[in-house]
Image: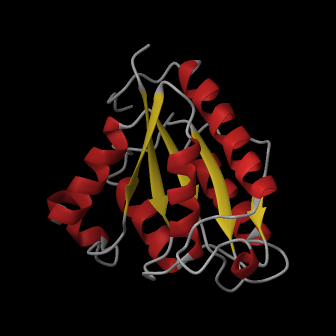
Amino acid sequence: MDEIIILGIVGSLRKDAYNRFALKAAQELVPDGAVLSLVELHGIPVFDQDSEMAMPAAVLEFKQRILAADAILFATPEYNYSVSGVLKNAIDWASRPYGESAWAGKPAAVMGASTGSLGTARAQYHLRQILVTLDMPVVNKPEVMMDNAALRFDAGGRLTDEPTRQHIQTLLGALVRLAKNSPRGKGQAT
């Protein structure tokens, strides 16, 4: 198989989001034979089913990035015990119109960072529920839930916590294995 292309989705719009920093750390830790590129959710409008047949350019570009990837790595913050509205909105857009979901069959992994003590546990569980309905095979272990994120990153946003770096590396290895064993070929829509 050619190089595995992983698309890292930043679930926050904040410039200095810990989840963006976590994905940048993951770019340094990706296994040989794989590459991780990031996608931001800026510019994706609020989902409007009346517009799904003539999707906005930002949504079309987002869907194309998903379709071109072999696997997805979600980095989600936790807002009010769940995923951020911006992440859920982007997921909804890319699943539409009905029967043309960019997600179906796409291997995925989930991680998240938060300043709280549960490290996005509730958001990740909600995201996993969403991924079930999208028919995405998901890496189950390890679970990468970075609590007290302010202590894990330095002032420049570099992940300095070695055990967390090792967990992310293990997660990426599992995601690459899942992608290699997935019947879903690159760029195939279901």
Q: Give above or below for 81 relative to 168.
A: below
Name the quadrant containing residue 176.
top right
Q: How is the image coloured?
A: secondary structure
Q: Quadrant of the N terminus?
A: top left
Q: Nearer the viewer, residue 121 or 133?
A: 121
Depth check: give the residue in front, 162 or 179.
162
* Image position, residue 113 (x, y; %): 68, 70
Give above or below for 120 relative to 35.
below
The structure residue drawn at horizontal position 73% and vertical position 83%, both measured from the top left corner, is 115
> Farthest residue toward the bottom?
80
Q: Position of residue 77 (x, y in %)?
A: 62, 74
Q: Residue at x 26, y 45 (%)?
A: 64
**30 to the left or right of 59:** right
Q: Position of residue 184 (x, y in %)?
A: 46, 24
- Quadrant in the picture for residue 107: top right
On the rendered image, what quadrant is the C terminus found in?
top left
Residue in the image at 71% along x and 52% along y: 165
Q: Quadrant of residue 185?
A: top left
- Asked if residue 11 lies left or right of residue 90, the reply is right
Query: As drawn, which residue projects farthest toward the top?
Result: 1
Residue shown at the point (21%, 64%) measured from the top left: 58
Q: Is residue 36 left or right of residue 162?
A: left
Q: Position of residue 84 (x, y in %)?
A: 55, 77
Q: Residue furthest right?
A: 117
Specify whether residue 18 is in view: yes
Q: Note whether 136 is above or below 83 in the view shown.
A: above
Residue 139 in view, yes or no: no
The mark tally for this picture is 0
| 8 is higher (above) or lower (below) than 135 | below
- The reply, left or right, for residue 57 in relation to residue 131 is left
